[in-house]
Amino acid sequence: MYNISPTEMKRMLEQTLVPPIGVTELDPGSVKAATSRLASSRGTAGESYHLRSNLTPASLTRLTPESTVKVIKDFYFSTATEGADRLVAEGSTKVVSVEALAAEMAPVLAPCWSEPPVAGALYYVDVLIVAGGALWKQVPGRPLLTFEGTWGLGEFAALQAAIPGAPDLSLPDRRVVFLTGALTRAQYVHGERGYRSMMTSAGLVAGALVRTCFVPTTDWRPVLVESFLDRDVNRLLRNDGVDRAAVSMIALSRIPRQADQHLPQPTEGHHD
């Protein structure tokens, strides 16, 4: 049996049980981690994925054929839209029009049914909102929402805790739009490269929704939220964190409308 001296044992314990008082940071921040990575031959997990998802002449031939891609996407969109339309015809409370439930959000969500590139990107990304005490999912290509689950003050409090420093999201003049990535659907089409397609689509959708907030008739000020506790947010959204996972959020604050101010008209001067 290997014998270790008391001095050496204490030195080992000092490094594990009691960190040296000179240590100021045991968990390096993102800047330090990225900088130290430059000297590492192993790299990061993100870099490894990026390289593994690169297409080669061989892997390009293994991608899903375009004809099959069309069948997959057509099936998804027709199932989503026809299902929602059927619920409307049946008078179900599991589906509601955006205008009826949250008319103030209709201008923000409008690209989801009025802009084909955005509606098409909803194959890769689900858009969800909170309204009327529930969580709702945007139907691709329709001004409709389908019920996802209940949502109350407890969920708002948990969401608040998952986004440190965010304003009070439970106030009446606040709204949140969630962008949830659908990785499995993306991989049906793009294989390992599906994550790239999912994130690209999320950016396309987020950009379109944020853009609508700057239309003169819209009363919202948007903030794109990219940093949050993934596990907690995914639990609130009923996501498993892999097949469906939160990608980003758009926090919206209502801009108070100002009454028109009638400025005095300039008077004509006398010229000598």
Image (spheres, rainbow, N blue to C red):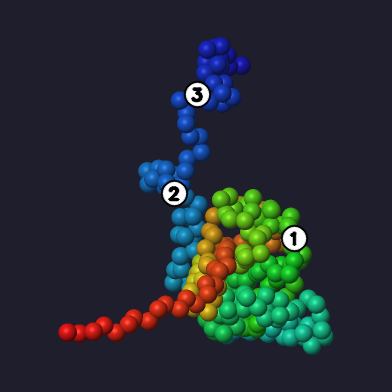
Amino acid type, callout 3:
Pro
In whole angstroms, how far apart are the C-alphas of marks 1 and 3?
46 Å
In contact (CB < 8 Å): disc 2 and disc 1: no
Residue at 69% in and 53% down? 157
Image quarter of the N terminus: top right
Residue 264 in percent (x, y) is at 40, 78
The residue labelled by disc 2 is 43
Residue visible at 46% across and 65% down in the picture: 54
SS of the residue under disc 2: loop
Q: Residue at x 47, y 28 (%)?
A: 23
Mark 3 lies on a secondary structure that is: loop
Q: Earlier in the sequence, mark 1 or mark 3?
A: 3
Residue 82 image point, x, y percent? 72, 85
- Taking 18 as reference, is 117 above or below it? below
Picture quadrant of residue 72: bottom right
Q: Is residue 216 visible?
A: yes
The mark nearer the N terminus, 3 or 2, is 3
Residue depth check, mark 1 versus mark 3: number of the one nearer the observer? 1
Q: Residues within 10 Å of mark 3 (few under 14, many from 20)?
A: few
> Furthest-top residue in view?
6
Question: Disc 2 or 1, which lies upstream in sequence?
Answer: 2
Where residue 194 sits in the image (x, y, percent)? 55, 68
Crowding at dot 2, Cα within 10 Å, few <14 / some 14-19 / many 20+, comes out as few
- Give the camera-side residue of 211 and 253: 253
- Amino acid tagged 2: Gly
- Label 1: element kind: loop
Residue at label 3? 20
Dot 1 amino acid type = Gly
Q: Which residue bears the numbered disc 1?
A: 152
Side of 220 relative to 264 (left or right)? right
Using the image, determine if residue 180 lies above or below residue 143.
Answer: above
What is the CA distance from the residue labelled 3 to the residue labelled 2?
A: 28 Å
